[in-house]
Image: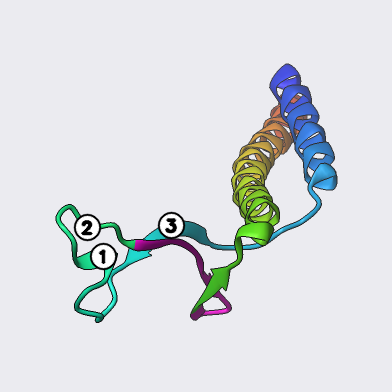
């Protein structure tokens, strides 16, 4: 049990280090969209159609409110990196919570075993 506790603590430390390395953060999902306009003679009405775009949108939910932002091509790399960092942050925090829960369970088991050992020793006297 002590080995597992040490292993979990080491994993949590690695997660903390990885979290500290994250820089730009932005929640959301990037999508690439193409549109068709209403002009009758436009290329987007041809066969096959040549739609307008691509246009990049970031869809997100934050504090229970959703939103969409149009992302310019020149900002695409920065926003893509920030969204990937945010997704990584969420995965790392979820993993940390899983490990912390397991660590807490093991610690409680260890304390119960120690109390049980002391109680049985006092009964023998």
* Contact between labelled residues 1 and 2, with CB atoms less than 8 Å apart: yes
User: Earlier along the polypeptide chain: callout 2 or callout 1?
Assistant: 1
| SS at badge 2 | loop
Q: Residue at x 62, y 56 (%)?
A: 76
| SS at badge 1 | helix
* Contact between labelled residues 3 and 1, with CB atoms less than 8 Å apart: no
Q: Nearer the viewer, mark 1 or mark 3?
A: 1
Point out which mark residue 49 bears.
2
Q: Is residue 59 magenta?
A: yes
Where is mark 1, residue-wise? 44
Does residue 78 lie above or below 106 as drawn? below
Q: Position of residue 85 (x, y in %)?
A: 68, 49
78 left or right of 76 in image: right
Q: Position of residue 70 (x, y in %)?
A: 54, 72
Crowding around mark 1 (Cα neighbors within 10 Å: few <14, some 14 to 19, many 20+) is some
Magenta residues, start to end: 52-66
């Amino acid at each position: 049990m002590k080995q597992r506790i040490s292993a979990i603590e080491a994993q949590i430390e690695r997660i903390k280090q990885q979290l500290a390395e994250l820089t730009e953060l932005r929640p959301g999902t990037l999508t690439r969209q193409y549109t068709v306009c209403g002009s009758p003679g436009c290329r987007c009405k041809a066969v096959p159609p040549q739609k307008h775009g691509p246009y990049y949108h970031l869809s997100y939910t934050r504090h229970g409110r959703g939103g969409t932002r149009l992302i310019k091509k020149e900002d695409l790399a920065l926003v893509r990196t920030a969204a990937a960092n945010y997704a990584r942050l969420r995965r790392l925090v979820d993993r940390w919570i899983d490990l912390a829960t397991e660590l807490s369970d093991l610690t409680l088991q260890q304390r119960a075993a120690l109390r049980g050992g002391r109680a049985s020793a006092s009964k023998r006297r």
